[in-house]
Image (cartoon, rainbow, N blue to C red):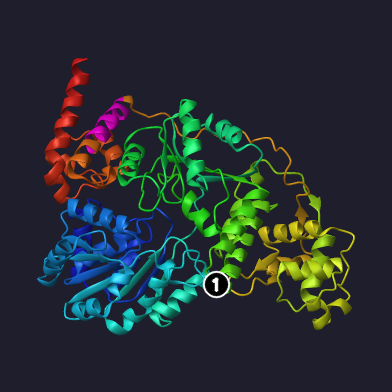
Amino acid sequence: MDSPAVHSSKYQVLRQVFGYDSFRPGQEEIVDALLAGRNVLAVMPTGAGKSLCYQVPALAKPGLTIVVSPLVALMQDQVAALKLAGVEAATINSAADRDTNVDVWKRVADGTVRILYLAPERLMTERMIAALQKLPLALIAVDEVHCMSQWGASFRPEYDELQNLRHAFPGVPIGAFTATADEVTRKDITSKLFGGTVQEYVSGFDRPNINLTVKPKNNTSKQLLEFLAEHKGESGIVYALSRKSVEETAKLLQDKGYAAVAYHAGLSPQVRSDAQDRFMTEKGIIVVATIAFGMGIDKPDVRFVFHADLPGTLDAYYQEIGRAGRDGEPAEAHMLFGLQDIRMRRKFIDDEGGGPERTRREHKRLDALVSYCESPDCRRQSLLGYFGEFSEPCGNCDVCTDPADKIDGTPEAKLIFNAIHATGDRFGAVHVVDVLTGKANDKAVQLGHDRSPAFASGKHRSRADWQSLIRQLVGAGFLTLDVAGFGGISVSAKGRALQKGETAFRYRPDLVRGAKRAARKANQPPPADARADGLLVRLKALRLKLAKQRGVAAYLIFSDRTLIDMANRMPLTKWDFGEVSGVGASKQEQFGDIFLAEIKSFVQSHRTS
């Protein structure tokens, strides 16, 4: 058990540095484990406050903390945010010149810097390791740790070197953090980074306030405009596959009167920064973006995420929709799904040149996403099932609120199960369909599967029928797809219950029918206090002005949550300003007088008007 002094220290850091009175659910247990010197693997939903879980221990313990991060822009944002909170943080990275990096290292070596951000390729050099071994390290935090797993959707080879950290720094606790990692990925991380021993914290993946919808794609522009007509004045993100599509879609929305901005990696840093600032500061901004947009963005009132094209994987989809509804209010995740998207994604995978193992694995991940799109049952059940979580039907997805016509497919399911068992419970959907339809290829003949009772048992239906049925069985949880292995399909516990006659399988015969859109619930109540809403507009404008003066992103000055609390409280004294959620001692000193003057001016103008 931790000493009372440690507990006092963590609360002191939380209040004085970050301006919070209490931890969010799941944070304190992780903080305590790291303070006690234990290794931690934490999987927490997007927006759950992962960074605080290692920043608080870093400042509550003596010594230097190393944070491993994959992107220079992310590191720079984190460092800027910590500096504004009064923390001596720094980064050494490839975007800075040599003199700047040398100056940072001098401050690290003399103990001035408390938290140092490094990319994995810079950290894992012999020279850097040797230099850090001479310093008192308090903690090593690995952010976006799913990047080190060969089974992860975003595998980065340079992250693989991090498995040597425990040998280079024995006794230094390691905290590993990610928003998305299924069971196979977690096991891989545990084995590599921790040698098999780690305290694991997996917060629930469910975001019940997000309505999940998947619709067949027929006219993307028309479908997007129909969707946005019900989201007038709301902030949201529209994801598209290509830079060209992003720019064309943003132009379409601008022509239709929407406040839309484009965001992709091909635009200049200044254009991207301006787009991000508008999104974070103004109301009703729609960002049309590639996947380049999103990491590090914490805007609570994003009311929708619209996928105009199929995302890459279910992992990516989960992360992208997780940018909506962080304030806990209702939000929508709406995806368009077409056969051309699947063909395009398959081509991307084949052209990537990642080697046969990665190519095979990514095709299986895409299969899992397609199964989600074609699931005949609750989408939330299908999505959470992918991450190993069970859910009752949610009542907040298109399948639950506007169920499609379904037909009993129990006899077909049993034929599929028989073919799976007859071929040894280890083959993928292609071979199982070959057996069902009676295709006597070399593999079937060599293994004797052409002599199985299951062979040609499904020749009365087409290959496309059986492939769709298998995808729907996977999506409904009757079959399990082995993404990490060789893509084999096997019968799950739910499937075995079907074989015993304890349940039935109903499937969607026509996934491209024009489904009538479910009536949408009102997303957001009107502001309780119009004055607070008016003040919030002024506070956001002030925040943007200060951010531009300092050359940082607007949300690093104060988050939207903090400005909302400030507008509701309308503090008029420095003491009251310090009570606002997210206002620590340093920010109170830097910005207190400036924001108080704006609030007082606002209050005075409303008294005299």
Position above or below: 145 against 394: below
Quarter assignment of residue 166: bottom left
Q: Is residue 407 left or right of residue 330?
A: right
Q: Foreground residue, 187 or 241?
A: 241
Examine the structure image and report whether residue 187 is included in the region drawn in magenta: no
Note whether 76 is above or below 32 in the view shown. above
Q: In the image, residue 290 lies at what x, y percent?
A: 46, 48
Q: In which quarter of the image is the C terminus?
A: top left
Secondary structure mostly taken by the magenta-highlighted segment of the chain: helix
Residue bounds of the magenta highlight:
531-543
On screen, residue 548 above or below 364: above
Q: Between 534 and 551, which is closer to the camera in this rendering? A: 551
The residue beneath circle 1 is: 355
x, y percent for residue 223: 60, 35
Q: Which residue is drawn at 17% across and 72% down?
A: 63
Q: Is mark 1 on a helix, strand or loop?
A: loop
Q: Where in the figure is residue 220, as x and y percent of width and height?
A: 60, 38
| In the image, residue 533 lies in the stretch drawn in magenta | yes
**How many numbered marks, from 0 up?**
1
**563 or 557: nearer the eye?**
557
> From this viewpoint, is residue 304 visible?
no
Residue type highlighted by circle 1: Gly
Residue 96 lies in quadrant: bottom left
Counting from the top left corner in percent of width and height, residue 309 is at 57, 46
Judge the density around disc 1: few (<14), some (14-19), many (≥20) Cα neighbours within 10 Å: few
> Quadrant location of the N terminus?
bottom left
Q: Residue furthest top?
A: 609
